[in-house]
Image (spheres, coloured by chain):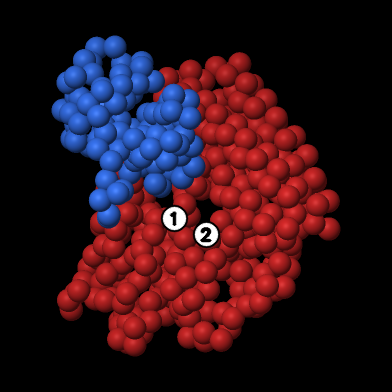
Amino acid sequence: MIQFEHKMAAHCESGTLCALLNHNGLKLSEPMIFGISGAIFFVFIKTPNMVFPVFDMRTQPGSIRINLQKRLKIKFKEQKFKKPLEARLSLESLLQKDIPVAVQVDMFYMDYIPSYMRAHFNAHYITIIGKEDQNTFLVSDCYYPSISKLSSDSLDKARFAKSDFAPNGFQFYINNHNSLLINENVLKQAIIKGIKKAAFNMTKVPIPFIGVRGMRKFADNILTWPKIARNTDALSHAIMCIHLTLEERGTGGGGFRFMYATFLKEASKILNKPELSEMAKEIMSIGDRWREISLFVARIGKARDLGENRLKELKQMIYERSKEEENFFNKLYSLVK
Amino acid sequence: MSEQNIIIPSKELKLEIKKLILEALKISDVNPDDIPDDASLFENNPVIQLDSVDALEIVMALQRKYNVHIDDQNIGRFIIKSVNSIAEFIAKEKAKAI
């Protein structure tokens, strides 16, 4: 087994990148990786196939890795496969050279995670750090407290699951350590670019589904849900999904806002800008208020207390967050422009 | 783990946490003494079985009562796995604050 420091993390993509970079000598925290990539986001998603719209609080899966490479000018070796056997052989050959390999998987097949925490999600990331025997891989999964074992069969199924974000055997690793030698100026510029991009996405993208506009669109849409729900249970389920998106799906709590607060605190020191530390406190308290929304929807969903007034209350709460975030990101942009 | 990091939470703290859980979840027909210290609160618990909504209720209640911030739900899940794990976390946080 490769000597690999296993750590839990808030989010699988940023956590896996953090562990891999740290292993290869580039010491960056998970929040710093998240912040540099400009991954804090809001998008309202409604397609004709969906009964209820959904939202996400981060940029799309894979974008943290892509933007991190671009802003820090670092390079991962990335590969996709058509055949599970070839994917497995490639992975094994890298492990034999003591190279830890990050792979994209369907989380459902991660047998070591308790069943009540598992769901089909094709954009989960883990790091493979060795083999225990012919049919068992050793896995560092930042959603689990210790290094785990996973059978080859489960890993094959997970790497070649179908549907949205199908992994197609995707793996990445570091084979050029020189590309990880970044200087302080590159880091500073990357932080500034990451902040600017996030602030731009949240307040200035002229698309009504994105950023604070997307929040308000989502809030308005909730009032139509009783008409499209086939029964109270379906409505309750849709309302409780808001809680899952805010707190449960690897957000680090408060819809990624707590992680962003930690990033700003670190950025404040690196850029020598004390104002960013104050901004960190502000987004932390905004995160707390997103968490209040999470608890509110969880309570009303569970109690089936889903009358018009409750939904109006929910809409109002989301509107308030959108106003707070509009002010926050405008202020943040002005601090780094 | 070094010996310095081992903090054994008191029985009183565990009882306080059991009462807090019942209060946060508005459960009135369970005696706090009946909740096992080491059983998972989510699976195969003979007295109470919680879901993710309850977990968030407990996180918020712990934050309010002990002035701690459990930012990360992934880590939070393991903190609130059992009465013992919650008590260990709170005892550690209290020790840090001293």
Q: Percent x, y for residue A3?
A: 32, 74
Q: What is the quadrant of the C terminus of chain A in the image?
A: bottom right
Q: Percent x, y for residue A133?
A: 17, 76
Q: Chain of mark 1?
A: A
**Decide: marks 2, 1 in contact (CB < 8 A)?**
yes
Chain A hue? red
The amino acid at mark 2 is Glu
**Residue A182 has which mark?**
none
Q: Percent x, y for residue B23?
A: 36, 17
**Which residue corresponds to the image point at 61% horizontal and 74% vertical from the top-left?**
A69
Q: Residues within 10 Å of mark 1 (few under 14, many from 20)?
A: many
Q: Is residue A187 above or below residue A239?
A: below
- Which residue was labeled with disc 2? A30
Q: Is residue B27 visible?
A: yes
- Which residue was labeled with disc 1? A9
Q: Earlier in the sequence, mark 2 or mark 1?
A: 1
Please indicate whether residue B90 sits to the left or right of residue A263 in the image. Answer: left
Q: Nearer the viewer, residue B71 or A42?
A: B71
